[in-house]
Image (cartoon, rainbow, N blue to C red):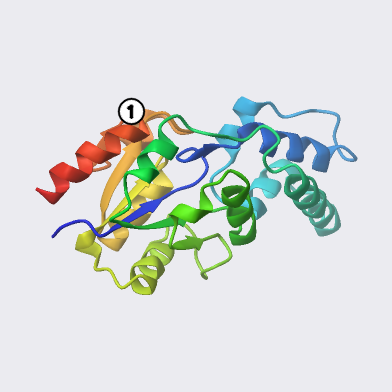
Amino acid sequence: MPVKLIIFDLDGTLIDSSVDIANALNYAMEPYSSRRVTRDETIKLVGEGISRLIGKLVGDRDETVRADVGKRFLKHYTEHIVDYTVVYPGVNETLKKLGRYRKAVISNKRESLSRLVLERLGLLKYFDLVIGSDTTPERKPSPVPVIKALSELHVSPDSAVMVGDSNYDVDAGKAAGVVTIAVTYGYRSLQVIANADHLIDRMLDLIPVLRRIDG
């Protein structure tokens, strides 16, 4: 069936937010560690939501420390959410050309933060729906958020595609029965996204792939 809905991941697919996340992590951990995480280390850590991200850094410290680090992270990140965050090349141009499709964002970032960063970067206007890690009971790689998007926008799985940069996106899409398209320029290596139905090296390549899917 023709594609009616395109579901996009956010970080590593539409935007590169790694520097702002790294800065927020370093601010959050300042009272507890002198070590600073780099952008490259941050890229390897992100993808499973804020709680898991904080947990990886805090380790086995008590819940009081974990709660304080989480609070400090959210405060700093919210206040500096687009200091260094950029939209990937070709994203704006591609979204402008996708007017006939319904479009959604599914992120493992919280919904409020996802909406805020999209709004600040001028991208929110392109999307019919934004789903974050706290919108549904489960987050990617679970198919639950993808199924919610399909339900909310009244689209069947065989009329939707999932576009992302990680195995979480590919696994969630496949489990929900939608076509998966992985970008090779994002945060994850080619090895972990190799089982996607289609691979694209730049966002503008999405348009010819959609034409091929539509037949």
**203 to the left or right of 12:** left
Residue 93 visible (yes or no): yes
Identify the residue at the far right of this view.
31
> Looking at the image, which residue is at 58% across and 53% down?
114
Residue 44: % across, % down: 56, 34
Q: Is residue 141 above or below residue 47?
A: below
Taking depth in this image into account, of 201 and 35 the one nearest to the observer is 201
Residue 107 visible (yes or no): no
Q: Is residue 79 above or below residue 175?
A: above
Q: Is residue 66 above or below residue 194?
A: below
Q: For the image shown, how many numbered marks are present on the structure?
A: 1
Which corner quadrant of the image does residue 16 belong to? top right
**79 to the left or right of 156:** right
Taking depth in this image into account, of 111 and 116 the one nearest to the observer is 116
Q: Secondary structure at mark 1?
A: loop
Residue 200: % across, % down: 30, 32
**198 to the left or right of 202:** left
Image quarter hosting the N terminus: bottom left
Which corner quadrant of the image does residue 81 belong to? top right
Identify the residue at the far left of this view.
215
Name which residue type carries label 1: Asp
Taking depth in this image into account, of 50 and 119 the one nearest to the observer is 119
Which corner quadrant of the image does residue 209 belong to? top left
Residue 180: % across, % down: 28, 48
Crowd around label 1: few <14 · some 14–19 · many ≥20 (10 Å): few
Residue 106: % across, % down: 46, 56
> Looking at the image, which residue is at 85% across and 34% down?
33
The residue wearing badge 1 is 201
